[in-house]
Image: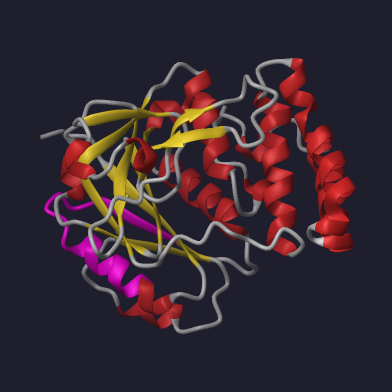
Amino acid sequence: MTSETVAVVVVTFNRADLLVGMLDGLAAQTHAPDAVIVVDNASTDHTRAVLEARTDLPLHVTFAETNLGGAGGFHIGVRAAYDAGYDRVWLMDDDVVPAPDCLAVLMAVDADCLIAVREDRAGTLVEKAAVDFDLRNPFAVRPKRSAVDTVYADRASMPELVEVQNVAFEGFMVRRDVVAEIGFPDPAFFIFYDDAEYAVRARRAGRRIWAVRDAVLVRQLDFNQQHDLSGWKGFYMYRNLFVVHLRHGENALVRLKPWLITLVVVLLSPARGGRAEARNVIRAMASARGMRRLTPTAEPPR
């Protein structure tokens, strides 16, 4: 068994009842975490009471004054874990529950970047991490070309380790030296694609990312990836997708793709989301241009 230390970073917002189950799962781990760093994004439900009542975990809680989004929360949590000197950091959302041996299985794998493999409450494989995340082809509208749950029918059909090219901050584990080299999650993303962008940075630094078949993480909510592109979430989905292409596109045509997507969405808006989606994508493109560089606070520590 590894002698490395590990801190769990959990970001939560107004999901106190789900958080209880997630914390129960951490308390039941056969490999106990050395710290559980929780960032509460200014919840207005009974999250504070839930956290203050826990005595069975090594909790370190930050109560943010405003909602920083998942990206801002993970930025704070990973930085706290790094500053405290932990060898590994395990990122976790508040709506997943790890199997009792999940952390032990991950810690037994000698690799810099790992993900636990997600399933739903019925045991169906729902791991969306990309097996192919294409930032080379300018004609691929979406960079995710295939995912673990589209390549494999179920967990049993997976090999022990599957290399993936992007991650979700739900069960992603990273070693301290990777953080030292590539920096922290970018808080400017707020929500969406902050995890994918971080994975691209890790891979560009030569780090491979492995999905660990026997590390089981159970999602308590169904995936809902059909967001209203004319609403506030649509702005972040467009903008952050554009930022990933502008920062990490592997050729000039890929880096031009956000402009083409913007043009197409505006032209098709009368038949799609109307003026609201057109305004969203124009605002997203303008904002993305200002995010071509990594936010300074996300840069590698000095």
Residue 111: image quadrant is top left
Residue 286 lies, with reference to residue 14, above or below; the image says above
Q: Position of residue 41 (x, y in %)?
A: 55, 67
The C terminus lies in quadrant: top right
Residue 72 lies, with reference to residue 105, above or below; the image says below
| Residue nearer the viewer, 151 or 86 | 151
Q: Position of residue 190 (x, y in %)?
A: 64, 54
Residue 119: image quadrant is bottom left
Q: Position of residue 285 (x, y in %)?
A: 83, 42
Asked whether the viewer can see residue 85, the reply is no
Q: Is residue 290 left or right of residue 207?
A: right
Residue 32 part of the magenta-drawn span: yes
| Residue nearer the viewer, 144 or 296 | 144
Q: Is residue 217 left or right of residue 224?
A: left
> What span is in magenta?
19-38
Q: Is residue 58 left or right of residue 70?
A: left
Residue 36 part of the magenta-drawn span: yes
At 87% across and 43% down in the image, what residue appears?
286
| Residue nearer the viewer, 219 or 81 | 219
Residue 59 lies, with reference to residue 109, above or below; the image says below
Asked whether the viewer can see residue 145, the reply is yes
At 22% across and 44% down in the image, what residue appears?
155
